[in-house]
Amino acid sequence: MKKHLNHRAFLILIVIISSGFAAFYLFDADPLAKDDSQELDRLFRDMLVLKIPHVTEPADIRLKDIEGRQVNLADFRGKIVFLNFWTTWCPTCRIEMPSMEKLHQKFKYKDFAMVTINLQEAASQVKEFFKVHKLTFTALLDSTGDVGTAFGIYQIPTTFILDKEGRIIAKAVGPREWDSKNAIALFEHLTDKYVAISNLTSAH
């Protein structure tokens, strides 16, 4: 009888251990990553932003800013980057710029950087535009238009969102209200909760 009880206890112990391993695999980071991805998908949809999956190479840009300083996009690694292509003569670019400034002011002390790329206009013209409209985010100059061509810009404004590893994860063609409730929720999620897929992979 005692031998039978010991055998039964052993079987129960095996079941408990097996259940523990099953729970580990079932409740590991993957469900959390799935929930995060679904939430991010919803936030992108709310802003009519197109999610771009499976981008592996970081975006590489080296341009001068309106003060003549060389800026490398890689300098912003570790931050969510709001990358906007525009011109001073574009009416819809002018419309969204004030909301961009508000977004910049709200997130500039977090892991966030707003970088704009002006297409083929003089530095003096862009500098004056920034002064008149009281804009304080980074303005780079694509004097030749080569960067715009490389990014496939066919309409302005066009905005890309880059993850903290410098990879494009989303795109918005046309203006948006970047200071809206939906926009704030999106960038709060990206700066506070978003984890790159490669980080999840390396953690396992």
Image (spheres, helix red, strand yellow):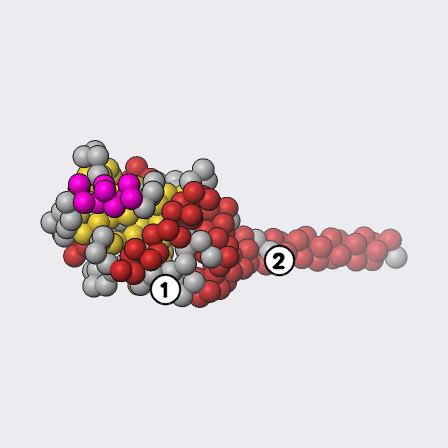
Q: Is residue 180 above or below residue 64?
A: below
Q: Is residue 58 above or below residue 51?
A: above
Residue 198: x %, y % from top left: 40, 49
The residue at the point 30 percent across, 55 percent down is: 94
Residue 89: x %, y % from top left: 21, 56
Instruction: Report how far apart the C-alphas of labels 2 and 1 lie in the structure.
Output: 36 Å
Is residue 152 toward the left or the right of residue 187 in the image? left
Please identify the quarter of the rendering in which residue 92 is found. Answer: bottom left
Q: Give the camera-side residue of 184 and 6.
A: 184
State the mark number for residue 61. Answer: none
Q: Give the camera-side residue of 123 and 63.
A: 123
State the mark number for residue 22. Answer: 2
Q: Amino acid at mark 2?
A: Ala
Quarter of the picture holding the N terminus: bottom right
Q: Which residues are magenta?
A: 124-132
Overall secondary structure of the magenta stretch?
A: helix
Write down the residue under mark 1.
50
Label 2 or label 1, whichever lies nearer to me, is 1
Residue 139: x %, y % from top left: 26, 43
Q: Is residue 126 magenta?
A: yes
Q: Give the camera-side residue of 195 and 158.
A: 158
Q: Is residue 80 above or below residue 33?
A: above
Q: Secondary structure at mark 2?
A: helix
Label 1 crowd (10 A; few <14 / some 14-19 / many >=20): some
The residue at the point 23 percent across, 52 percent down is: 88
Label 2 crowd (10 A; few <14 / some 14-19 / many >=20): few
For the question of whether residue 17 can be seen, the reply is yes
